[in-house]
Structures are given as C-alpha cells and as structure tokens.
C-alpha cells in the first residue's frame, strides 16, 4: 500500500500551486483549480510524518458525494472528478474565515467549556452542560483562515464584520448556507445511523457570486457519532464512539503531543498507520452506505498525472 504524501506536477497553463496541510491545489489559468487530496494527515495544525493509505481517495469521494447532494442549497465549486484523488472546479477567491458549525458540545469547545469558558466566538453557552450534550440549536463558531504554519484563531461574527473581513450581506448569506448545509448533512447522516456532530465549511467568490469551496462532511472536517449508542453513552458519561479525526488527536495527546513548541510527534508505527486507514474506510462505508473498493495504488503519481492531463486536454 502506497501513501501519496507529495506532488509536484507541471500542468499546461498552470499559474501556481499551493501545498496545504492535506491538499495540493493547482491553479490553471486563474479559471480552474485542480485539487489533489493527498494521504497526508494533520492534527493540531501539524502535518504528521507518515501518510495514511487510501485517506485521500476516501476524503475526495465523500466530499464529491456531499457536494453533489447539496448543490440545490448553494452553488459549489466542483466541476469534475478526473481521478479518485482529484477534484477539478471553479477557481474562487476564498473568504478569509471558516464557518464552523456545532450541534454538540465536544472536542475543542468542550475543552474550553471545561476550563470555564461560557461563550465561544461570542456565542453564549449555558451553565450545567455535559460533554457531548446536544445544543438547543446548532451554533456557528467561525475561525480565521491562518497562513500555513499558523494556527486558525476563533473569531466572533461581530469581530469579522468590524474588521471588514466579510461584508454584512455576504456574511448573512454564508450563515444561511452554513445552517442549511449542516441540516442536510444531519439528515443524510441520520439515514445511515450517524449523528453529524460538528463540521466546517469554506466559501469563496467568483464574479460576485458566493460558492461553497474545498470539501464538506469528510472525517477531516467533521465529527460523527453512532446514533444508536449516543444516548446510552451520554447518560453513563462514557466517551462516544465516533468517526472523525478526534481519535488521532486523542492518540497524540495520550502520547504527550498537542502541537506545542518543543513537543515531539510520537512514533507512527505501521500498526498505528493501518488502524487510522481502517477507521477512514469505516467512516466511508458508514456515511455512504457503500463498500469501499481500494484503488490500485501502484504508480499513483503517474495515474493522477495522466488522468488530469486527459481531463484538461478534453476541455472543461
């Protein structure tokens, strides 16, 4: 099993390439983006030293399915899927904030709450809540989009508008889209026996129109609980069984790593890497209701290059 951790293609009419934590995004003539979803994995804003086989393909396939399943709610950037690990789409100017929406008190929001915080990004949180408790209604807790190597920072709606990061009209529309997308994601998850706990959305503009960009509802951007076990575990105060990247974060924290200065990433043994890969496959099968068929990972770079070149040659 090969993991794709680096790409460095030179496509026709390529203007630039951006290597993110997980995705490599190639700008084709400022008209279109070729997004390659690598097998890199990040946590605490740090790229871990080993890739996870099939992770990129899983993320790309889930995102593609959800972009298609929500295109009636808001326009999105996706045009085509030239390769199992690639999405091609409209080149938008990304808005400088990420819209994080939470249905339950867990993860970083629970850690903040446990330490005494009673508001997150300007949204008040009532006293007396327990870990993994459902909010009365979903809350939006935006973050700034950090430069590479920097941490995303929580920010309130009021601060976003005060700083002029997003116009009031655009923010209102993006807020509506965010809640409607989360509602659709919640409904689809429920059909599969899952709870969509929290997720993030990114938006961009092209010719004055707002598009949903990047990916949605994958285990890198979302957290899922198993619905049939939720209530029992919650009442007993037990940890929820979840399908998300949180188990990676927990493994890192148990081994003394939270992305802070001077901390070392624990050794990623073959067993650890394979177990993470299996968890991603489990999520794919649970959220889509389909068996995951592993692609041939021999000559990955060559396959991707040939598929993208063929796509670009045939026009878009």
Image: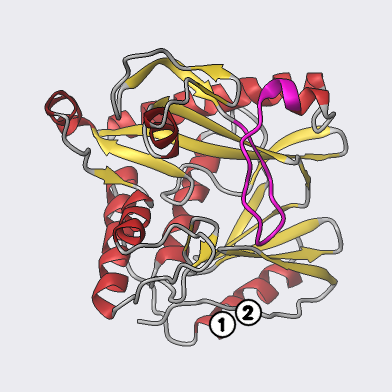
**Image quadrant containing the N terminus:** bottom left
Label 1, residues with CA under 10 Å away: few <14, some 14-19, many ≥20: some
SS category of the residue bearing label 2: helix
Residue 228 position by quadrant: top left
Marks 1 and 2 sit apart, C-alpha to C-alpha, by 6 Å
Residue 26 on image: x %, y %: 73, 66
Identify the residue shown where x is 65% and y is 72%. 308
Identify the residue shown where x is 44% and y is 57%. 258
Q: For the stretch drawn in magenta, what is the main secondary structure?
A: loop
| Left or right of residue 172: residue 16 | right
| Left or right of residue 267: residue 215 | right
**Image quadrant containing the C terminus:** bottom right
Between residues 241 and 254, which one lies in front from this camera angle?
Answer: 254
Identify the residue shown where x is 66% and y is 51%. 79
SS category of the residue bearing label 1: helix
Between residues 89 and 165, which one lies in front from this camera angle?
Answer: 165
Can you tell which mark lies on residue 301?
1
Residue 238 on image: x %, y %: 16, 35
Residue 137 position by quadrant: top left
Q: Which residues are magenta?
A: 142-159
Q: Are marks 1 and 2 in contact (CB under 8 Å)?
A: yes
Above or below, 102 relative to 35: above
> Which residue corresponds to mark 2?
305
Residue 146 on image: x %, y %: 69, 50
Above or below, 118 relative to 206: above
| Left or right of residue 262: residue 133 | left
Identify the residue shown where x is 36% and y is 33%. 106
């Amino acid at each position: 099993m090969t993991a794709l951790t680096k790409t460095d293609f030179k496509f026709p009419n390529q203007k630039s390439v951006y290597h993110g934590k997980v995705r490599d995004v190639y700008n084709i003539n400022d008209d279109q983006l070729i997004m390659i979803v690598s097998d890199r994995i990040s946590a605490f804003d740090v790229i871990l030293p080993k890739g996870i086989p099939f992770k990129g393909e899983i993320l790309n396939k889930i995102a593609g399915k959800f972009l298609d399943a929500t295109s009636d709610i808001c326009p999105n950037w996706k045009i085509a899927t030239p390769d199992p690990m690639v999405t091609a789409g409209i080149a938008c100017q990304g808005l400088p904030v990420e819209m994080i929406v939470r249905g339950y008190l867990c993860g970083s929001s629970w850690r903040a709450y446990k330490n005494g915080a009673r508001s997150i990004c300007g949204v008040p949180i009532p006293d007396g809540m327990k870990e993994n408790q459902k909010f009365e209604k979903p809350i939006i807790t935006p973050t700034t989009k950090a430069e590479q190597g920097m941490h995303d920072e929580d920010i309130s709606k009021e601060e976003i508008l005060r700083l002029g990061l997003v116009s009031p009209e655009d923010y209102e529309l993006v807020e509506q889209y965010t809640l409607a997308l989360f509602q659709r994601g919640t409904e689809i998850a429920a059909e599969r026996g899952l709870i969509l706990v929290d997720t993030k959305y990114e938006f961009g503009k092209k010719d004055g129109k707002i598009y949903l960009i990047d990916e949605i509802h994958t285990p890198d951007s979302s957290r899922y609980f198993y619905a049939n076990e939720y209530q029992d575990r919650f009442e007993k105060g037990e940890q929820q069984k979840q399908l998300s990247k949180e188990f990676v974060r927990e493994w890192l924290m148990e081994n003394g790593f939270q992305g802070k200065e001077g901390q070392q990433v624990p050794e990623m043994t073959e067993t650890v890497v394979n177990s993470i890969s299996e968890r991603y496959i489990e999520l794919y099968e649970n959220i889509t209701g389909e068996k995951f068929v592993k692609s041939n990972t021999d000559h990955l770079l060559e396959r991707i290059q040939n598929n993208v070149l063929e796509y670009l040659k045939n026009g878009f």
